[in-house]
Image (cartoon, coloured by chain):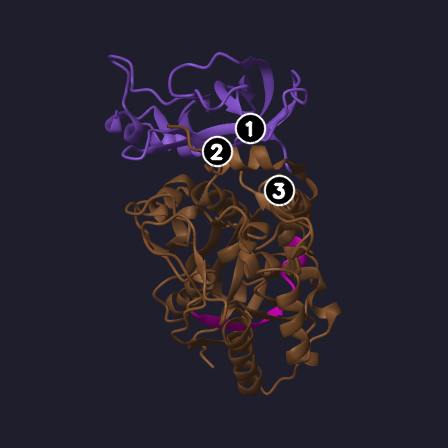
Amino acid sequence: MMKPERPVGITGYGVYIPRFRIAAREIARIWDGTSGTPVDSKSVPGPDEDTITMSIEAARNALARAHITPDRLSAVWVGSESHPYSVKPSGTLVAEALGATPWVSTADWEFACKAGSEALTAAMGMVGSGMAEYVLAIGADTAQGRPGDALEYTAAAGAAALIVGPAMDAVAVIEGTTSYVTDTPDFFRRADTAYPVHGHRFTGEPAYFGTVRSAAEKLLRDLGAKPSDFTYAVFHQPNTRFPQTVARQLGFTPQQIAPGLLSPKIGNAYSAAALLGLCAILDVAQPGDTIFVTTYGSGAGSDAYALRVTDALPERRERAPLTAAYLARETFVDYAVYVKWRGKLVME
Amino acid sequence: MDLAKHWRLRHARYRLEGQRNRFTGEVRFPPAPPLPGEREDIWEPYILKGRGRVYSFSVVRQPPEGFEDQPPYLVALVRLDEGPMVTAQLTDCDLDQVAIDMPVEMVTRRLRDLGPTGLIVYGYKFRPIVS
């Protein structure tokens, strides 16, 4: 288990989910109406949204909750697999929009669906070593799926922003983390292609299930804890079934994962997925509650975290819109609008 | 590509940064250089809160160059809580949803995409308040 010398925690958190949704049955209407769908609906970014715009809004919400001025952020880190530019950091623009520039470290992180939690773990190190007082770690994505591919039902959009700071100022103290990584070809996209490729042989086992279990079991072992010691748990959610299954394999109950299971309604928000679930849990958790988080990124790796909620949470969560407010404003679009907005029409 | 123009406007566009008069507290947007003979330190940078109300609006169906893929879209005059009036697109707002006096909040969105070898221009728009 990794743990900084100085205790750290989450001092502010914020989410963003676009207002638009497409129903899985609408995608099935076009491609395959015969089999079941992996989610009910997924979030769709509007035509003026991308990883940068979603990161900015989630981060503004996190700053409002942390109640610090943006110049106190020592680093602004954006984890995503859908950075709008290949060369030109998302982090600089996000930091500028927040007012955190120029005395700030920024970087873009990449690790499929766990790019955001990579930034979170690094933030623990920066703050835990005393190099930084506050670090902003963001997971955000506007994921793409090839038309007709199974992934098209789930590849969604969203952003979650976490400000890591001293434990004494935290809404939830991070008690420890593990990272488990192997080179596994379960899912990849070459640099100049639009859509990713599945290594079907690997997707569930050993990739998602094996990797999530490894990180989670080691953290439980190192903490001397068992699943029933936690009030809530959240796992990376590429669909509805995977997080439910891995929770059961590990010994967590459906009740523990319910508040953080957002994929049935918004699909797989990639780098934001598990972190959005964590934020949704922070929206309802009470002081003393404990939260178990495990992210997953193809390629493949998982980061697991154990958190304990402090007395500061109930007052601070009211300072920005709750996850439920973003989930509630759902406007459904049809496949034609979705295809236009996602750039799948050949115009010239 | 007007790189310098977009760069120069970034603070105003990304975070609605205007100016506040150190002596009277008056807030103005967009920021402006001091008038000839005016003391340089009268106006200090000030980030507006981004809340306001729709003063008036119009639906754009015949877009200017560079906005061809966007119509129909809403452009509004927004009276900000601090006093200044700004012109901006409304986003996340249906055409039949907008009304004069509707409360709105600022969000940072993509304004324009200058093509595969160009800049993506970001800036403020306004939308109905998410609470």
What is the quadrant of the N terminus of chain B in the image?
Answer: top left
Q: Pinpoint the chain carrying mark 1.
A: B
Foreground mark, 1 or 2, reads 2
Q: Nearer the viewer, residue B40 or A323?
A: A323
Q: Residue A272: give its label.
A: none
Residue A171 is inside the magenta segment: no
Q: Could you tell me the amino acid type at mark 1?
A: Thr
Q: Which residue is mark 3?
A: A30
Residue A80 occupies quadrant: bottom left
Image spot of residue B130 (x, y percent): 64, 37
Which of pointers 3 and 2 lies earlier in the amino acid sequence?
Answer: 3
Residues tagged by mark 3 and mark 2 found on one chain of the structure? yes
Q: Is residue B79 above or below residue B123?
A: above
- Disc 1 on helix, strand or loop? loop
Q: CA distance from mark 3 to mark 2?
A: 25 Å
The chain painted purple is: B
How many numbered marks have been drawn onto this rendered protein structure?
3
Q: Residue at x 38, y 16 (%)?
A: B65
Q: Which residue is mark 2?
A: A48
Q: Does the segment drawn in magenta span residue A307?
A: yes
Tell me what residue is drawn at x 45 percent, y 75 percent. A179
Q: Which residues are magenta?
A: A300-315
Which part of the image, by quadrant, shows the C terminus of chain B? top right
Q: Please indicate whether residue A267 sits to the left or right of residue A68 in the image.
A: right
- The CA distance from mark 1 to mark 2 is 8 Å
The residue under label 1 is B91
